[in-house]
Image (tube, rainbow, N blue to C red):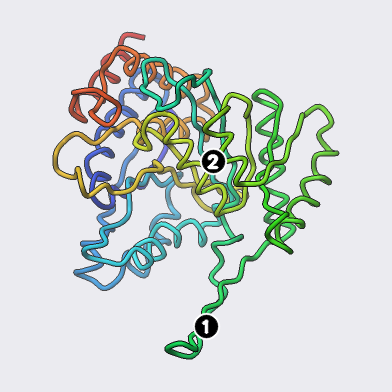
C-alpha cells in the first residue's frame, strides 16, 4: 500500500475549521482508492503559538517538516495578535523560501450552480503559474533617515533561472491542457524587470512551437479576467502579479473561499506545500460556516502532485456536483455548515 506522509498545519482562524474536514475527505479518497493511505501529523504553529513562544515555528521546525512528503496548510494570520508581516514571513513564506517552493499554481474555473458575479462566465477554466521565490517579493531593501527625509527602498529581483523555470513550467502545463500560455507583463511602465521578463518569454516560446501565446499588460489582463476569462488557459506571472490575478480568479468564481493553491518544489529536495488561497477570515471564525471547498480542492492538487490524477479529477467532479446541487456555505449562496458540505462530498465519494 502506498503511504503518503502529510504534515498538517491548520494555522489560524478558519484554517482550524476547514483542515479537519479536508483530512476526512482525503481519508475517504484513500478508502475508495484501496491502495492508498495518508499519515497525518499535526503541528500547532500559528499566531497563538507566536504569542506564547515569540516565534511562529520552533527553530527545528523546518527540519521536522522535511521528513514529510507534503505540507497541508490551512491559513496564517491574526493581526490582532501578530502583525501580518511577522506571521507570514515567520511561517508561510519561510516554508516557501527555505523549501525552495519556486512555483505557485492556482486554478480557477466556473462551476455549474456557482453564483459567479459575472453575467456570462462562459465556462472559464484557467490556471495561473506564479513565480514564487523572488520578483517583487524579495527581501532586498531598507529604510534610512526619519521624518520628512525618510526613504524606503524595495528592490525587485528577477533572475534568469527563476523567470525561465516558471515559464517552462507554464508551457509544459499548457501541453497537457488547451495549449495556450499568456504572459503577464507591465513593460510599458516598469523599466527594467518587465522588458527582461518579456525577452525571456519570447525566447522560451520558440522552444514550444505548438503552444499558442499572448502577452498582456497586467492592468489589461486583470480587466480581461473579468470581461472575458474564457480566453485563457495557462497564465504565467511574476510573484506580485500572480498573487493579484489569482485573487481576481477566486472572485470571478464566486468566492475566494473555494480557490486552491500549490507551492511546488521542483528539485525533490524538500516537500511541496498545499494551501487554499483564502486567509484566516476572522470575521466568520467560530461560526461553522467557512467554505471547505478551497481546502478540499487544494487536496485535489496534492493528489495530482503525487500522480493520483484520476482520483483527483474524481474528487473535483464530486465537488462540482455538490455545488451544483446547492449544498454549499453562505459565501456562495448556500445555507449549509462547513461539515455538512464535507460530509456530502465524502458520502458521494463512497458511492463511486
Depth check, front residue: 325 or 12: 325
Q: Is residue 136 visible?
A: yes
Q: Is residue 326 left or right of residue 114?
A: left
Q: State the image coordinates of residue 77 (x, y, percent, origin top left).
A: 30, 57
Whether residue 269 is visible? no
Q: Is residue 186 above or below residue 5?
A: below
Q: Earlier in the sequence, mark 2 or mark 1?
A: 2
Instruction: Identify the residue at image location x=22%, y=65%.
Output: 81
x and y percent of residue 324 in the render? 35, 14
Residue 54 image point, x, y percent? 26, 73
Q: Which of the numbered marks, if any, corresponds to residue 151?
A: 1
Is 114 drawn above or below residue 331 in the view shown?
A: above
* Location of mark 2 (residue): 105
Along the line of sight, the residue nearer the viewer: 62 or 1 = 62
Dot 1 lies on which element? strand
- The image shows residue 289, relative to residue 323, as above or below, that is below
Quadrant in which residue 215 is drawn: top right
Q: Say whether residue 78 is left or right of residue 239.
A: left
Q: How many marks?
A: 2
Mark 2 to mark 1 CA distance (whole Å): 35 Å
- Local SS, label 2: strand
Q: Please state if 244 lies on the left or on the right of 6 as rendered.
A: right
Q: Tell me the quarter of the picture where residue 60 sits.
A: bottom left
> How far across and how far down the image is residue 4, in percent?
42, 37
Q: Quarter of the image containing the C terminus?
A: top left
Residue sitting at x 51%, y 30% = 304
Q: Which mark is residue 130?
A: none
Name the residue furthest left. 287
The residue furthest top is 351
Q: Quadrant of the N terminus?
A: top left
Q: Classify mark 1: residues with Cα within 10 Å, few (<14), some (14-19) or many (20+).
A: few
* In front of the other: 243 or 86: 243
Amino acid at each position: 500500500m502506498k503511504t503518503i506522509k502529510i504534515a498538517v498545519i491548520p494555522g489560524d482562524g478558519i484554517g482550524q475549521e476547514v483542515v479537519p474536514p479536508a483530512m476526512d475527505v482525503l481519508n475517504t479518497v484513500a478508502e475508495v482508492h484501496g491502495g492508498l493511505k495518508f499519515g497525518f501529523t499535526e503541528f500547532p504553529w500559528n499566531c497563538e503559538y507566536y504569542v506564547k513562544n515569540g516565534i511562529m515555528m520552533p527553530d527545528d521546525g523546518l527540519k521536522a517538516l522535511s521528513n514529510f512528503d507534503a505540507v497541508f496548510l490551512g491559513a496564517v494570520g491574526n493581526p490582532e495578535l501578530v502583525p501580518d508581516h511577522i506571521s507570514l514571513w515567520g511561517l508561510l513564506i519561510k516554508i516557501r523560501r527555505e523549501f525552495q517552493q519556486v512555483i505557485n499554481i492556482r486554478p480557477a474555473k466556473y462551476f455549474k450552480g456557482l453564483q459567479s458575479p459575472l453575467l456570462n462566465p462562459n465556462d472559464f477554466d484557467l490556471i495561473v503559474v506564479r513565480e514564487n521565490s523572488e520578483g517583487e517579493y524579495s527581501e532586498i531593501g531598507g529604510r534610512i533617515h526619519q521624518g520628512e527625509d525618510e526613504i524606503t527602498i524595495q528592490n525587485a529581483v528577477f533572475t534568469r533561472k527563476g523567470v525561465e523555470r516558471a515559464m517552462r513550467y507554464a508551457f509544459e502545463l499548457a501541453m497537457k491542457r488547451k495549449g495556450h500560455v499568456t504572459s503577464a507583463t507591465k513593460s510599458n511602465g516598469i523599466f527594467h524587470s518587465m522588458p527582461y521578463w518579456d525577452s525571456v518569454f519570447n525566447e522560451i516560446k520558440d522552444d514550444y512551437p505548438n503552444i499558442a501565446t499572448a502577452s498582456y499588460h497586467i492592468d489589461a489582463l486583470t480587466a480581461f479576467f473579468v470581461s472575458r476569462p474564457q480566453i485563457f488557459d495557462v497564465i504565467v506571472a511574476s510573484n506580485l502579479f500572480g498573487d493579484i490575478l489569482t485573487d481576481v480568479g477566486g472572485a470571478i468564481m464566486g468566492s475566494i473561499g473555494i480557490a486552491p493553491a500549490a507551492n511546488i518544489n521542483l528539485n525533490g529536495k524538500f516537500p511541496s506545500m498545499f494551501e487554499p488561497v483564502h486567509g484566516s477570515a476572522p470575521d466568520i471564525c467560530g461560526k461553522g460556516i467557512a467554505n471547505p471547498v478551497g481546502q478540499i480542492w487544494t487536496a485535489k492538487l496534492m493528489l495530482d502532485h503525487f500522480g493520483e490524477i484520476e482520483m483527483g479529477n474524481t474528487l473535483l467532479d464530486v465537488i462540482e456536483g455538490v455545488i451544483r446541487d446547492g449544498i454549499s456555505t453562505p459565501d456562495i449562496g448556500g445555507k449549509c455548515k462547513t461539515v455538512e458540505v464535507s460530509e456530502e462530498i465524502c458520502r458521494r465519494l463512497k458511492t463511486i
